[in-house]
Image (cartoon, grey):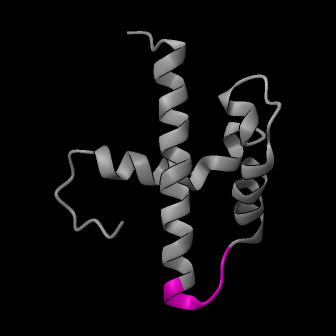
């Protein structure tokens, strides 16, 4: 099953949102944040000339935290979900 470009863009944006939520949670719990992940998201707010959704964030590797969180949330595991 292939995913079309529009759906892929939505998944990327949702992963970015999950990364934001994770970073906010880290700040609230520890007072610290992963600087590289924070800068990726901050820079995405200033990106006005991206060629595609992935380019807004640099590349997908910079959204790994958000992708992992999204995967955890959508998995069938019954574990307690904190985010």
Give the x, y percent position of residue 23.
57, 70
- Is 79 part of what is drawn in magenta? no
Q: Quadrant of residue 80?
A: bottom left
Give the x, y percent position of residue 38.
71, 65
Residue at 80% from the left image edge and 37% from the top image edge: 48
Q: Quadrant of residue 52?
A: top right
Residue at 48% from the left image edge and 64% from the top image edge: 21
Give the x, y percent position of residue 82.
32, 70
Q: Quadrant of residue 76?
A: top left
Give the x, y percent position of residue 8.
51, 24
Q: Which quadrant: the N terminus? A: top left
Residue at 78% from the left image edge and 23% from the top image edge: 51
- In this image, 45 relative to 4: left or right? right
Which portion, as a residue range, is magenta?
28-33
- In this image, 43 relative to 17: left or right? right
| Closer to the camera in the image, 72 or 38 | 38
Q: Is residue 77 above or below residue 24?
A: above
Name the residue furthest left: 78
């Amino acid at each position: 099953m292939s995913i079309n470009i529009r759906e892929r863009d939505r998944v990327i944006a949702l992963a970015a949102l999950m990364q934001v939520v994770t970073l906010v949670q880290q700040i609230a719990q520890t007072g610290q944040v992963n600087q590289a992940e924070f800068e990726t998201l901050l820079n995405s707010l200033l990106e006005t000339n991206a060629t595609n959704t992935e380019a807004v964030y640099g590349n997908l590797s910079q959204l790994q935290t958000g992708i992992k969180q999204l995967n955890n949330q959508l998995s069938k595991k019954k574990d307690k979900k904190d985010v």
